[in-house]
Image (cartoon, rainbow, N blue to C red):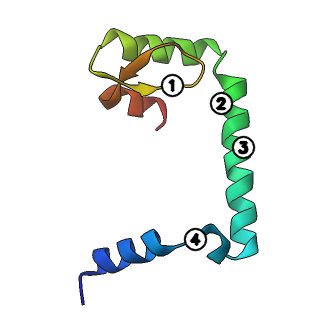
Amino acid sequence: MGTYSQKLADFVCGLKFQDLPEEVRRRVRFSALDTIGVTLAGHHHESARMAVDLVRSHGGTPESTVFGYEGKLGFRLTELLFS
C-alpha cells in the first residue's frame, strides 16, 4: 500500500502536463513567463550583483548557475538568492 509520501510521489511522477486542468496549465505558463521576465529585469540591479558577489565570496563547490552571471556558485548559499 505504501506511505502517504510514497503515494503522493507516485502521483506526481505519473502526472502529465496535459492531465492538469486548463486553468492550472494557464497559471503555470504565466508563472514561468513571469519568473523569466522578473529575472531578466532584475539581474542588472545593483542589489542582485551584491548578493551574487556575497555568495561568490563564500566559495563552495561551484555547481549552481545564476542567470546573467558568469561561472558557477556554491549551492548552499546560492539557494539564499532565491528565497
Q: Earlier in the sequence, mark 3 or mark 2?
A: 3
Seen as rendered, the residue at the extreme left is 2
Q: Earlier in the sequence, mark 1 or mark 3?
A: 3
Q: Are marks 2 and 4 in contact (CB under 8 Å)?
A: no
Q: Quadrant of the N terminus?
A: bottom left
Relative side of 83 to 22, left or right: left
Gap in angstroms between the C-alphas marked 4 and 1: 28 Å
Q: Earlier in the sequence, mark 1 or mark 2?
A: 2
Question: At 39% across and 20% down in the image, what residue appears?
Answer: 73
Which residue bears the numbered disc 3? 34
Instruction: Tell me the tag on residue 66.
Output: 1
Identify the amino acid type marked 4. Lys
Kindly tell me whether residue 70 is visible in this rendering. Answer: yes
Closer to viewer: mark 1 or mark 3: 1
Neighbourhood count class around disc 1 (C-alpha, 10 Å): few under 14, some 14–19, many 20 upward:
some
Gap in angstroms between the C-alphas marked 3 and 4: 22 Å
Which residue bears the numbered disc 2? 39
Which residue bears the numbered disc 4? 16
How many numbered discs sit on the rendered protein?
4
Neighbourhood count class around disc 2 (C-alpha, 10 Å): few under 14, some 14–19, many 20 upward:
some
Q: Are marks 4 and 1 in contact (CB under 8 Å)?
A: no
Gap in angstroms between the C-alphas marked 1 and 3: 17 Å
Q: Secondary structure at mark 1?
A: loop
Identify the amino acid type marked 3. Asp
Gap in angstroms between the C-alphas marked 3 and 2: 8 Å
